[in-house]
């Protein structure tokens, strides 16, 4: 039974993020093979390299356990110099109650961050890079890369600060005025030399590798624990009054008052004096309350809290070592939690012992009072030096791992590429060298007190981002977010965000603002570099957007639609996108913030035995949308005929209440297609996939082209038949041969599609001559020429029955008005409504005033242009003779429209279109008799021959209103 449970335990450990070699200890070789297979499976599920050699090397190089890799380094970073050098400053200026509360608040904020770290680190395999790895794989490469850079520099500055602290500890005790011995020279350059020696020592340790770091960490941790134990034991052992000398660094006190402070031993009165917040209204040198003798500045709560909080921000040290941990999914959460609890209890204990035994004057004027009361004074010095040395070492090794992860992910391109080339196993030698050089540079700057604020806020920004990542994962409700660590929720992450954000501005509002601006600048730079296109890690933003869109789509009820809030929801049918670019761009302007869908039909039968051809083309259509910068969705379907595929798209495009209400089709004519993609760019030498060109002009090609609504059998970007190794290997004409250029659609089928759209309750638009549209020339700012958007709201097939106030006429004006509302079009175009008048009209002037009043009521700013057309309508034949039956009349419903009339209408429109940008025409309803379809299409063709870009519109639903 025990043997059967072994694979389950090892599987769970690996799924929690580990590559723990201990999981297979004691397992036979026969049993070990399936375990390694399971490991590779879980690595693949979490996105890790599953190659055998890589995984085996990775497991062998992961040498750190929970104690050596997380618990000890985090404890040492949490103690650092704060425990030995600043406890008196905090308790003396805040009092025991406020100091304990402040420490609890700080650790509470850290606890929420730790819970978020635990949740993320147990939701999959964690690789090297620590906080950067977790944030980038959740929030995306842009935000993760920016936070990673800030966190890297935070560790660099922190390492320099701790190195400086170690140097100060050595000089204070062994300098020319040292407390223990006097053999070290003092001075700025001497201090720099000592810091350089410590930095070189750290460099050697890091170059040797994580194994020596772990061993050294354990030794230092044991030494620091022994020194802490000596401090704790000194309080009960030395339970008598001791005069502790005030340090020479406090000249203000030494020049006017006594040179000693009093250690009383355990005393109730001393505890009462130190229990509450000291009275800072009387700031004399006797109490020195409210003044920092080290900097001679007024001590505030924000300053005290900043000192305390900046000393306990080392909770990410263990996470930074994730690449060297055997089981990061187990070691990071439990090691971090246990170290946080342990250090918190140690701080509380020393706070209480200090408040019960040391007078307030001593705490405010001797921050290193522990040395004066310790059973052996060098213990405190050893604790200061070893704690700061270890913290410095942890930060430099952590910064190198973050830099190595950034270089591996190629977030910053060539800036970090060469750093990743120099490595030894999992030890990033190049990153270690760069980190050490940068620490050396920071040591050279000197005066790091102000830079320390940047360090703390950089850390807080990374902690805030970690909480944000956890909150996003929880709010997105993604099924794959199921961490094995359960002790967290969305509100713990939210409290962590609020707490870390507030502490940033408590420590320094100006520095916090600068750091946030730096973060935003890095995010913008990385976004412009588009690393998300190179790194398909998955971004939480997409999951959150999906979650919110789904919620609001459910609230969007089509039964509550009202004409006041009508907007065009466009479905544009596209055959060859190379010839449809101007129309795609024009429709994007026409949609007025409505739904816009590009529809494409692939002719064929999907038998289920092969891959879905529609799914294969979808990414290429999305590339088209990205390049043309249109706000459109893409729908690709497979049908036996184009007509059948059109039915699919009209019925199923959109979602919920967001469905197309207007279908746009290209016009069926014999004009040859033209290719608007004038050049191609090969994505990579190994790839046969071409990218849409960065720039091209719609008006740069003079060839005639038509846009058809039918769909070909090939993808618009598929060049897999052409094995190219360079951009010049395949020309546009060669690639065009791989596309379907002829539709094969009969006039009957085309007009039948128009009739089907109307029968399905959708408005329809037929678009012609858009290959002639030169949008750049129309919208050119330096041109003084004005262009016009023309509307002809008359049914030229039935002029006697035409109603300018009808649904289609109003729909025409609405679409033209929407186009004219677009800012770029509004500046360069004017709207004109042509009113065809004849001598037979009762009162043409009254009719013109009526139309003008209607436009005013509809808030349409247009010029009315009356156009006489008696000379054209005279060519219309009598519809019915007395001898014709109704059946004969229906079969010959278009016979009254002879060529003279149609050519006259064409000439009338053409004569008014000298400066026209777009013409909107009334599209007559399709005949009921399919036998009339070819004649119907022929008449439309003749009316629109030689015109500017033309949209023929037929509306079936009300789209305008005069009510408020």
Image (tube, rainbow, N blue to C red):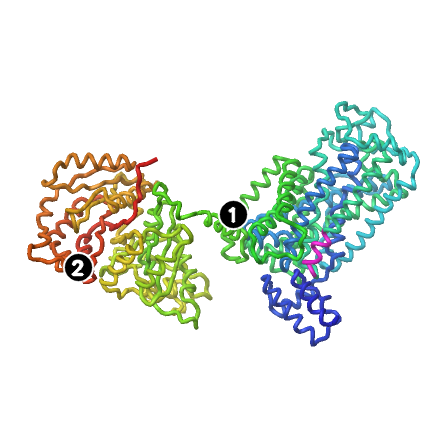
Q: From this view, report whether residue 89 is shown above or below residue 231.
A: above
> Neighbour class for label 2 at 10 Å: few (<14), some, many (≥20)?
some
Instruction: Name the residue nearer the viewer: 109 or 185.
Output: 109
Q: Are marks 2 and 1 in contact (CB under 8 Å)?
A: no
User: Can residue 804 be seen in this snapshot?
Assistant: yes
Give the residue at x 59% y 63%: 45
x%, y% of residue 873? 11, 47
The magenta segment is: 327-336
Secondary structure, mark 2, is helix
Residue 332 counted in the magenta span: yes
Comparing 240 with 753, the one in front is 753
Front tag of 2 and 1: 2
Front residue of 534 and 910 = 910
In the rendered view, tell whether residue 921 sits above or below residue 301: below
| Main secondary structure of the magenta stretch | helix
Tally of numbered discs: 2
Q: Which residue is mark 1?
A: 525
Which quadrant of the structure image shows residue 610? bottom left
SS under mark 1: helix
Residue 219 location (% of width, % of height): 81, 54
Q: Earlier in the sequence, mark 2 or mark 1?
A: 1
Quarter that holds the C terminus: top left
x and y percentages locating residue 277 in the rendered image: 77, 30
Is residue 150 in view from this perspective? no
Which disc is residue 298 wearing?
A: none
Residue pictured at 41% horizontal, 69% vertical: 723
Residue 239: percent from the left, percent from the top?
Answer: 92, 38
Q: Which mark is residue 935?
A: 2
Residue sitting at x 21%, y 43%: 804
433 and 849: which is toward the camera: 849
């Amino acid at each position: 039974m025990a043997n059967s449970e072994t694979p389950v335990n090892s599987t769970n450990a690996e799924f929690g993020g580990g590559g723990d070699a201990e999981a297979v200890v004691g397992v036979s070789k026969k049993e070990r093979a399936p375990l390694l297979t399971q490991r590779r499976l879980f690595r693949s599920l979490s996105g890790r390299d599953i190659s055998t050699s890589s995984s085996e090397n990775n497991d062998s190089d992961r040498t750190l356990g929970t104690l050596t890799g997380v618990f000890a380094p985090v404890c040492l970073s949490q103690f650092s110099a704060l425990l030995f050098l600043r406890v008196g400053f905090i308790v003396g200026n805040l009092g025991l109650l406020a100091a304990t509360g402040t420490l609890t608040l700080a650790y509470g904020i850290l606890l929420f961050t730790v819970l978020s770290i635990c949740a993320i680190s147990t939701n999959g395999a964690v690789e090297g890079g620590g906080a950067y790895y977790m944030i980038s794989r959740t929030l995306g490469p842009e935000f993760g890369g920016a936070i990673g850079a800030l966190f890297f520099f935070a560790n660099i500055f922190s390492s320099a600060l701790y190195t400086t602290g170690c140097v100060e500890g050595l000089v204070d005790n062994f300098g020319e005025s040292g407390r223990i011995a006097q053999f070290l020279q003092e001075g700025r350059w001497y201090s720099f030399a000592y810091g350089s020696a410590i930095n070189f020592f750290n460099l050697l340790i890091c170059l040797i590798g994580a194994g020596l770091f772990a061993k050294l960490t354990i030794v230092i941790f044991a030494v620091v624990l022994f020194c802490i134990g000596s401090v704790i034991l000194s309080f009960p052992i030395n339970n008598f009054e001791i005069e502790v000398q005030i340090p020479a660094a406090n000249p203000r006190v030494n020049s006017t008052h006594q040179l000693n402070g009093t250690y009383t031993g355990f005393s109730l009165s001393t505890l009462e004096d130190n229990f509450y917040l000291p009275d800072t209204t009387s700031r004399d040198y006797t109490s020195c309350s409210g003044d920092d003798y080290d900097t001679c500045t007024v001590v505030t709560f924000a300053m005290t809290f900043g000192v305390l909080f900046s000393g306990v921000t080392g909770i990410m040290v263990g996470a930074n070592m994730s690449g060297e941990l055997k089981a990061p999914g187990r070691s990071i959460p439990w090691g971090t939690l246990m170290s946080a609890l342990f250090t918190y209890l140690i701080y509380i204990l020393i706070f209480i012992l200090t408040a019960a035994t040391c007078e307030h004057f001593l705490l405010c004027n001797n921050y290193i009072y522990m040395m004066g009361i310790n059973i052996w004074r060098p213990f405190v010095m050893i604790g200061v030096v070893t704690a700061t040395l270890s913290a410095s070492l942890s930060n430099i090794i952590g910064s190198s791992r973050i830099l190595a992860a950034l270089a591996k992910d190629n977030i910053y391109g060539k800036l970090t590429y060469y750093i990743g080339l120099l490595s030894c196993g999992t030890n990033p030698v190049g990153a270690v060298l760069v980190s050490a050089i940068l620490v050396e540079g920071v040591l050279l700057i000197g005066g790091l007190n102000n830079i320390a604020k940047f360090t703390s806020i950089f850390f807080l920004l990374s902690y805030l981002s970690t909480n944000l990542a956890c909150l996003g994962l929880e709010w997105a409700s993604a099924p794959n977010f199921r961490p094995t660590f359960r002790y967290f929720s969305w509100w713990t992450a939210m409290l962590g965000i609020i707490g870390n954000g507030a502490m940033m501005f408590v420590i320094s509002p100006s520095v916090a603002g600068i750091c946030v601006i730096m973060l935003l600048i890095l995010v913008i730079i990385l976004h412009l570099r588009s690393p998300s296109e190179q790194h398909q890690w998955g971004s939480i933003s997409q999951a959150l957007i999906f979650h919110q869109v789904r919620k609001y789509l459910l609230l969007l009820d089509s039964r509550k639609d009202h004409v006041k809030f009508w907007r065009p929801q466009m479905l544009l049918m596209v055959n060859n996108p190379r010839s449809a670019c101007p129309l795609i761009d024009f429709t994007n302007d026409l949609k007025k913030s409505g739904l816009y869908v590009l529809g494409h039909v692939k002719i064929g039968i999907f038998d289920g035995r092969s891959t879905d051809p529609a799914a294969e083309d979808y990414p290429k259509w999305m590339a088209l949308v990205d390049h043309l910068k249109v706000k459109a969705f893409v729908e690709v379907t497979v049908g036996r005929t184009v007509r059948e595929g059109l039915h699919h798209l009209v019925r199923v495009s959109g979602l919920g209440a967001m469905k197309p209400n207007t279908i746009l089709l290209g016009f069926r004519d014999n004009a040859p297609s033209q290719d608007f993609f004038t050049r191609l760019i090969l994505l990579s030498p190994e790839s046969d996939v071409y990218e849409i060109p960065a720039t091209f002009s719609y008006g740069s090609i003079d060839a005639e082209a038509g846009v058809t609504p039918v769909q070909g059998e090939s993808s618009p970007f598929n060049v897999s038949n052409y094995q190219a190794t360079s951009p010049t290997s395949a020309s546009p004409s060669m690639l065009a041969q791989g596309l379907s250029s002829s539709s094969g659609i009969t006039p009957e089928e085309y007009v039948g599609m128009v009739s089907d759209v109307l029968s399905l309750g959708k408005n329809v638009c037929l678009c012609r001559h858009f290959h002639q549209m030169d949008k750049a020339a129309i919208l050119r700012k330096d041109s003084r020429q004005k262009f016009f958007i023309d509307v002809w709201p008359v049914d030229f097939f039935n002029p006697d029955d035409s109603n300018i106030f009808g649904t289609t006429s109003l729909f025409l004006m609405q679409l033209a008005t929407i186009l004219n509302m677009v800012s770029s079009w509004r500046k360069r175009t004017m709207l004109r409504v042509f009113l065809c008048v004849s001598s037979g009209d009762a009162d043409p002037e009254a009719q013109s005033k009526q139309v003008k009043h209607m436009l005013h009521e509809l808030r349409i700013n247009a010029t009315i242009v009356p156009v006489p057309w008696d000379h054209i309508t005279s060519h219309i034949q009598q519809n019915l003779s007395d001898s014709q039956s109704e059946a004969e009349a229906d079969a010959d419903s278009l016979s009254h429209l002879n060529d003279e009339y149609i050519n006259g209408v064409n000439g009338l429109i053409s004569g008014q279109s000298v400066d026209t940008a777009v013409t909107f025409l009334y599209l007559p309803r399709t005949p009921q008799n399919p036998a009339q379809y070819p004649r119907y299409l022929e008449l439309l063709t003749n009316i629109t021959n030689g015109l500017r870009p033309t949209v023929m519109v037929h509306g079936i639903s009300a789209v305008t209103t005069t009510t408020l």
